[in-house]
Image (cartoon, grey):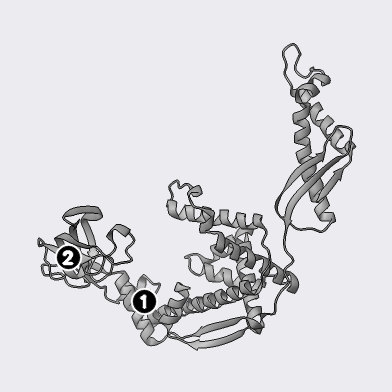
């Protein structure tokens, strides 16, 4: 876009800036604020004009795109094509615009919706899982069995030589956990504290270290301690940890069931939403503005750097663009499609659904009312929740037209599928 700016607007702004500079300029031979204007112009005129041009071009560009009803995507590049004092300024702004998104019909989107319920057996299994999570270990004087925890030293040898990453001292290992390569944990079963033994194992063909893929090695094992797992009783103290203070088993099971039903609902919603988003992304093909892709790549890179860094400094520039580009393009495409849907249907976040979502989040804290008040008094937090609710409203709208097939599943299948998706 070529933009013209009257000479008087630019020259007046330059003159004002020079007068401001004159008040603060200090030069040998002149008192502060008394440097002649011709000297100020000679020394600083070019730099001041360039500074003014940057501001004028930015302001004029914003006025022009508003007048032409354009939607720039990202920051423009400016190049002054006519730039002389006393003459009209002319510059070219190069920029990308948001694409026109022509919405497709939603009736070609196919969704498989899991249908499941929480059974009594599922509740009992979950209680066992909770017991496992709170298990303690007690030292025993017997041979190690699957499910026991052993404390061991081990040293791996390949062709009689120790290899990198193949040794440790005083490491705890739960037998049967599958934490180590096949054959390692099985070889320790039957050993007692004080026992030493060599175990022959072969690394898997797809092992992460290429040098060890498919290689036969020997591990020298020394067992220091064998501990048996002790599961807690489901008593009043155990139930109290889950908010049931009176030790009533029926209440406890009802609380566990309620949490499982919430998890199941979230899992099903998440799986359905993912399929809807895949459908929307696949339906709409249009050119994506590069600045938006770059912004999304940068956001994803910073997010991963924070995860990798674990609170320490991590150089985000080590992560190449290619690592994020495909996901970033999908995210930008979906963002533009969602924006088009919201605009076309004039959707606003439903206040009741927002209130329900806020209360659901708050219910997981000890002082729910404080959390609710905090969210509603914090515009940024509230905006995030409104955005999530708007996404749900779009999903509901798409589902009204999409081909939805229900598929019966167990609780475990429904939750697992969502985790894998």
Percent of width and height locating residue 350: 67, 73
**Among numbered discs 1 and 2, the one appearing first in the sequence:** 2
Q: Tell which of 161 and 169 is nearer to you.
A: 161
Q: Is residue 271 left or right of residue 232?
A: right
Quick one: SS at disc 1? loop
Query: Which residue is identified by label 2?
Result: 200
Please state the horizontal and vertical placement of residue 178, each as a whole percent of the image.
28, 69
**Image quarter for residue 46?**
top right
- Along the viewing direction, whichever of 372 and 392 lies nearer the viewer: 392
Instruction: Name the residue: 45% across, 47% down.
Output: 314
Spatial CA distance of label 1 from label 2 is 53 Å
User: Can you tell which quarter of the image residue 372 is in?
Assistant: bottom right
- Spot occupied by residue 275 in the image (x, y as percentages of width and height): 56, 76
Secondary structure at badge 2 equals strand
Whether residue 353 is visible to the viewer of this picture, yes or no, is: no
Q: Is 6 drawn above or below residue 323 in the view shown?
A: above
Q: Closest to the observer: 27 or 336?
A: 336
Q: Find residue 331 and name its label.
A: none
Residue at label 1? 246
Query: How many numbered marks have been drawn onto this rendered protein structure?
Result: 2
Residue sitting nearer the eye, 369 or 340: 340
């Amino acid at each position: 876009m070529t933009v013209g700016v009257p000479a008087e607007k630019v020259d007046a702004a330059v003159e004002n800036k020079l007068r401001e500079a004159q008040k603060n300029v200090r030069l040998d031979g002149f008192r502060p604020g008394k440097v002649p204007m011709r000297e100020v112009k000679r020394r600083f005129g070019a730099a001041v004009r360039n500074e003014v041009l940057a501001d004028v071009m930015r302001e004029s560009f914003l006025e022009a795109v508003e007048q032409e009803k354009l939607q720039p995507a990202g920051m423009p590049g400016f190049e002054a094509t006519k730039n002389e004092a006393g003459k009209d300024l002319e510059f070219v702004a190069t920029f990308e615009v948001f694409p026109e998104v022509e919405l497709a019909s939603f009736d070609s989107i196919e969704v498989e919706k899991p249908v499941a319920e929480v059974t009594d057996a599922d509740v009992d299994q979950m209680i066992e899982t909770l017991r496992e999570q709170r298990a303690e270990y007690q030292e025993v004087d017997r041979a190690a069995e699957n499910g026991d925890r052993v404390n061991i030293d081990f040293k791996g040898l390949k062709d009689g030589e120790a290899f990198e990453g193949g040794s440790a001292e005083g490491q705890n290992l739960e037998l049967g956990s599958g934490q180590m390569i096949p054959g390692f944990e099985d070889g320790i079963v039957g050993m007692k504290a004080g026992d030493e033994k060599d175990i022959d194992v072969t690394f898997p063909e797809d092992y992460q270290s290429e040098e060890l893929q498919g290689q036969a090695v020997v591990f020298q094992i020394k067992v220091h301690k064998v501990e048996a797992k002790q599961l807690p009783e489901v008593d009043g103290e155990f139930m109290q940890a889950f908010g049931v203070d009176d030790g009533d088993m029926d209440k406890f099971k009802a609380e566990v069931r309620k949490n499982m039903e919430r998890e199941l609902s979230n899992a099903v919603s998440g799986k359905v939403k993912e399929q809807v988003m895949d459908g929307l992304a696949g339906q709409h093909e249009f050119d994506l503005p590069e600045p938006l892709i770059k912004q999304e790549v940068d956001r994803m890179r910073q997010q991963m750097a924070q995860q990798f860094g674990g609170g320490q400094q991590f150089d985000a520039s080590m992560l190449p663009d290619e690592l994020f580009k495909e996901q970033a393009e999908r995210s930008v495409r979906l963002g533009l499609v969602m924006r088009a849907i919201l605009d076309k249907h004039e959707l606003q976040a439903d206040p009741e659904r927002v209130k329900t979502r806020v209360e659901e989040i708050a219910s997981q804290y000890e002082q729910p009312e404080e959390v609710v008040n905090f969210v509603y008094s914090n515009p940024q937090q509230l905006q995030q929740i409104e955005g999530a609710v708007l996404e749900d409203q779009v999903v509901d709208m798409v589902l009204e037209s999409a081909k939805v097939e229900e598929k019966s599943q167990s609780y475990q299948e429904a939750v697992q599928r969502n985790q894998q998706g």
